[in-house]
Image: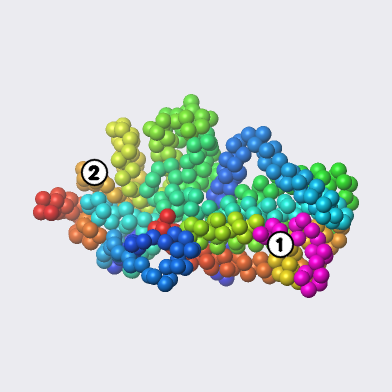
């Protein structure tokens, strides 16, 4: 019930949420068309480097490895960007916290939406790649929206916790950067989880991001339905992370204005 | 009917001797607790404001006026006591919250007006009026960073007053700007008053307080000294200064 009330209140602020998210997005690309294209260079460069290293040196044999890699990078980039921006959503906007009132989670939510806009833009590159490699499309694409919602919820939950903690502990941002870096290698982005023996695999699959990325690959690249178990696990983890993130945020929120 | 009820409100700030701002410091600090000073910004403040009233809050610097406004605006929470606000509060604590120097005047109007709670349709209908009032029609597509500080304040003020407040909190907004601008502010204040908006007015400008407010509250070192008719409260304040 409380959750529904809360969602209703946030819905009343949808205009503000969107204005803040869109403003930040425009600001990032400095309103220039060229700015948008620069932002595509980063994932492409990463793709090239990782592709060369992993397909030639490590000899990973995966069908459509370029796409496999690019999809993993884009999805991970979203998590990474959303949480890094979310981390500063409160601390980076002192006047909005100290001089005016609206529910503070709006700042975190809108920064996650900005990250989403940036990722949507990046995924245009992926769509182009899909066309170039002539990957057959299937009805399994209907899983994609659900997978993206799960990814967004995971990112929002983490961002809420990080944004609140960062106000009180300024080293959270450095610690989080290290965790993200480690997470990039610990999540099956560069490799399929099947390169590990069964026993190790289960450890990797504790990570909800692993399930999200694997499901997305199945549905988008390999014309396979996403595994129900994966979606269920990711869904439960996403709900838990959002709940924990929100509890942490709500705990610290009353003291934001004083602490900044 | 009262729209704001403040009962026995206290606000205490804790100021640690050694501020710990990292997880590392917090963990190592568990073994070696640091002391802190408490600063009581407000002590046992009780008052209520009637609908449509213009209520002044006066006092020296550091007497807790701004803290009280922030409590009313829900930006901070009281340490003790209760605050109940029955209508929508619009705080004018700072003009131009969320202004972005890289955006044009119109873009900034849209953002700021949204933050101040205007709907999309209301904003689009009022943009021309806002620019006109600010005297900046020619600069609608100029980036804010190319504006002088005076122009920025005019733009912010013109946008802010387009909101339809039910309860308005004003903190020293009049202190910025030249005479003409201050006069405009006072005109707007008068307009709001005639429209029946409840206004909480914090100012050092005792003449304005006397002219506009019905009742006032005098704070000294966070304590409520007098509450009542504006003339009596101001007289008490003025005589109190001499007595120290």
- Residues B171 and A184: in front is A184
Which residue is the site of mark 2? B205
- The residue that disc 1 covers is A186
The residue at 70%/48% (across/down) is A120
- Mark 1 and mark 2 on one chain: no
Q: Nearer the viewer, residue B90 or B99?
A: B99
Location of residue A153 in the rendering, given as x and y in whole percent from the top left corner = 65, 61
Q: Residue at x 30, y 40 (%)?
A: B175
Q: Is residue A63 above or below residue A229?
A: above
| Residue stretch rendered in magenta on the structure | A182-201
Query: Is A205 positioned to the left or the right of B235 in the image?
Result: right
In the image, taking residue A111 as reference, residue A54 lies left or right, namely right
The residue lying toward the viewer, choosing from A110 and A188, is A188
- Magenta region, main secondary structure: helix
Q: Is residue A105 at all visible to an observer of this figure?
A: no
Check residue A195 for magenta coloring. yes
**Residue shown at 44% from the left, 48% from the top:** A95
**Dividing the image into 4 quarters, which one contains the N terminus of chain B?**
bottom left
The residue depicted at 63 percent of the width and 52 percent of the height is: A81
Give the percent coordinates (x, y) of residue B167: 38, 53
* Residue B139 colored in magenta in the image: no
Locate residue A19 relative to residue A253 in the image: left or right.
right
Whether residue B142 is visible, yes or no, is: yes
């Amino acid at each position: 019930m409380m959750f529904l009330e809360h969602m209703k209140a946030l819905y009343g602020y949808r205009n503000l949420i969107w204005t803040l998210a869109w403003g930040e997005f425009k600001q990032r690309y400095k309103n220039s068309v060229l700015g948008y294209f620069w932002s595509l260079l980063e994932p492409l460069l990463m793709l090239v480097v990782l592709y060369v290293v992993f397909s030639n040196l490590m000899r990973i044999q995966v069908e459509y490895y370029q796409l496999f890699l690019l999809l993993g990078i884009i999805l991970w980039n979203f998590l990474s960007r959303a949480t890094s921006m979310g981390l500063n959503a409160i601390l980076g906007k002192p006047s909005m916290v100290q001089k005016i009132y609206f529910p503070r989670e709006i700042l975190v939510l809108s920064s996650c939406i900005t990250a989403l806009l940036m990722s949507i833009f990046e995924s245009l590159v992926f769509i182009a790649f899909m066309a170039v490699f002539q990957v057959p499309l299937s009805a399994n694409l209907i899983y994609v929206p659900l997978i993206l919602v799960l990814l967004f919820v995971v990112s929002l939950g983490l961002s809420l916790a990080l944004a609140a903690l960062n106000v009180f502990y300024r080293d959270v941002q450095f610690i989080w950067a290290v965790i993200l870096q480690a997470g990039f290698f610990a999540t099956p982005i560069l490799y399929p989880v099947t390169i590990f023996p069964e026993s190790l695999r289960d450890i990797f699959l504790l990570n909800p991001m692993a399930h999200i990325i694997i499901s997305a690959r199945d549905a988008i690249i390999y014309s396979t339905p996403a595994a129900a178990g994966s979606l269920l696990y990711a869904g439960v983890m996403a709900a838990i992370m959002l709940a924990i993130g929100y509890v942490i945020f709500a705990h610290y929120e009353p003291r934001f204005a004083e602490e900044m | 009917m009262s729209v704001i009820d403040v009962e026995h409100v206290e606000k205490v700030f804790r100021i640690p001797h050694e501020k710990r701002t990292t997880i590392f410091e917090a963990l190592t600090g568990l073994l070696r607790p640091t002391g802190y000073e408490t600063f009581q910004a407000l002590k046992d403040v009780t008052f209520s404001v009637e609908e449509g009233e213009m209520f002044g809050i006066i006092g020296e610097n550091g007497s807790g006026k701004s803290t009280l406004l922030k409590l009313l605006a829900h930006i901070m929470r009281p340490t003790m006591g209760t605050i109940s606000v029955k209508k929508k509060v619009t705080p004018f604590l700072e003009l131009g919250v969320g202004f972005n120097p890289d955006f044009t005047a119109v873009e900034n109007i849209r953002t700021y007006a949204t933050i101040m709670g205007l709907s999309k349709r209301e904003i689009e209908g009022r943009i021309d009026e806002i620019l006109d009032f600010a005297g900046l029609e020619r600069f609608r597509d100029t980036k804010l960073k190319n504006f002088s500080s005076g122009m920025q304040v005019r733009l912010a003020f013109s946008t802010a007053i387009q909101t339809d407040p039910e309860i308005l909190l004003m903190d020293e907004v009049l202190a910025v700007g030249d005479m003409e601008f201050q006069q405009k502010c006072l005109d707007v204040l008068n307009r709001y008053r005639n429209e029946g908006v409840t206004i909480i007015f914090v100012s050092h400008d005792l003449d304005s307080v006397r002219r506009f407010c019905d009742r006032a509250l005098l704070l000294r070192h966070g304590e409520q000294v007098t509450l009542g008719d504006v003339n009596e409260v101001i007289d008490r304040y003025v005589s109190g200064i001499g007595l120290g």
